Image (cartoon, grey):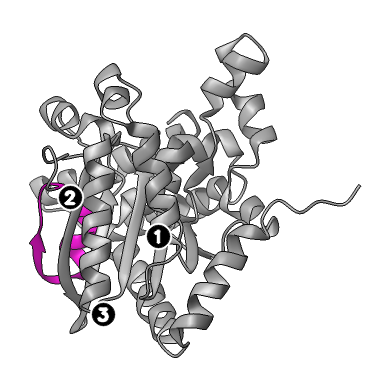
Amino acid sequence: MEFEKEILELDKKILELKKFSQDKKIDLTGEIERLEINREKCLEEIYNKLSDWDRVHVARHPERPYTLDYIENMTENFIEVHGDRLCKDDPAIVAGFCKIDGRKFLVVGHQKGRTTEEKLYRNFGMASPEGYRKALRLFKMAERFNVPIVTFIDTPGAYPGIEAEEHGQGEAIARNLMEMAGIKVPMISIVIGEGGSGGALALGVTDKVYMLENAVYSVISPEGCAAILFKDASKAPEAAENLKISAKQLLELNVIDGIIPEPLGGAHRDHICAANNLKNVILSSISTLEKIDVDTLLKNRYNKFREMGRFVE
C-alpha cells in the first residue's frame, strides 16, 4: 500500500541487519532494536491518521485474515457443512459448527481466496443464492439445537452474474433478511474486511453488529459510487469519504454496536492477535445476549434495524 512505503523500507532494513548479524556473527542487537522502535512509532503514526480510502485498501489487503483463518486460530473441532439442499454448494460461503473455549457455536462467513486458483474457486468472496440458502439452512439448524450464531462478513457484494440472477439472488438475500430477524438464538455479526451491499447484509441481521477497526461497510463500493455519481471511477477516494464507510463513522451513526481493535498496522500483520480480539468480543457478547429471554431478544433485534436511518432536519 502506498502509505506503507516507509514501513516496508524499515522492514527490509531490519531483515537485512538480522541476516547480516547471523551470517557474520556480529552483535547488532542495539541497532536492530532501534529500527524496530522506529518502525512501531511509524506504524502508530500512519495508522492513527488513515483516511477512509486508506482503510478500504487495508480491508482489501491480500494477507488480511479471512473467515477460515479466524476459524483456524480461535475455534476447536470445526465441522464444515456443505450445500443448500436445493441445488449445490457455494464455496464463497463457509459454514460449520465448532467450539470456542469449549462453547458450541455455528460460524458462517464469506471466504475470499489468496492464490488465483482460490480466488476463482471462492468467486472472490461473492456469494451466489446457493451460498445464502446454505447459510439460512444452518441458521435454522442452529436454532433447532439452541446453538448461538456468529457470522463473518467480508465480501465486495453478492455475485451479480446472470446465473445468480436466474437462480433468485434477490429472493435469497431478501429471505435471509426476513428469516434472520426471527431466528430464536443469540446472533452476532462481525465485518472483518469488506462489507458490501446486500451481499453483506444477508449475513448481518443480528442482535449485535461489530466491525474490525480497519474494516469498511457500505451500500456500494467507493469505485462504484464514483462511477455512478461522478461518472469517474478515479474519484473513489472522494466517494469513500462521503459514504461514511469506516467503523468509527458507522458507530457514531448507530449502524454498528462496537469496534474491535486490530493489531498495530492492521490485522494482516498478526492473525493470532486479531483472532484473540474477535474471540473475546464473541464470548462476552454472546454471554450477555444469552441472559435475555427469546421474546425480548427478537423484539430488540427488530427494533435495532427499524430505528436505523433516523435524521434531524
Q: Is residue 17 magenta?
A: no
Q: N-terminal of the two: label 1 or label 3?
A: 3
Residue sitting at the far bottom: 291
Instruction: Give the residue drawn at x 63%, y 9%.
Output: 231
Q: Nearer the viewer, residue 108 or 293?
A: 293
Circle 3 Cα neighbour tier, 10 Å, few/some/many (<14 / 14–19 / ≥20): some
The image shows residue 99, relative to residue 258, as above or below, that is below
Q: Which residue is mark 3?
A: 146
Q: Nearer the viewer, residue 16 or 249?
A: 249
Kind of residue at badge 2: Ser
Q: CA distance from mark 1 to mark 3?
A: 14 Å
Instruction: Give the residue drawn at x 18%, y 70%.
Output: 75
Q: Are marks 1 and 2 in contact (CB under 8 Å)?
A: no
Circle 2 Cα neighbour tier, 10 Å, few/some/many (<14 / 14–19 / ≥20): some
Q: Which residue is mark 2?
A: 21
Q: Secondary structure at mark 1?
A: helix
Kind of residue at badge 1: Met
The image shows residue 151, relative to residue 217, as above or below, that is below
Q: Secondary structure at mark 2?
A: helix
Q: CA distance from mark 1 to mark 2?
A: 57 Å
**Residue 129 falls left or right of residue 222:** left
Residue 180, numbered circle: 1
Q: Nearer the viewer, mark 2 or mark 3?
A: 3
Q: Position of residue 2 (x, y in %)?
A: 47, 28
Q: Nearer the viewer, residue 105 or 240?
A: 105
Q: Position of residue 96 (x, y in %)?
A: 16, 61
Instruction: Give the residue drawn at x 30%, y 64%.
Output: 275
Kind of residue at badge 3: Asn
Q: Which residues are magenta?
A: 67-84
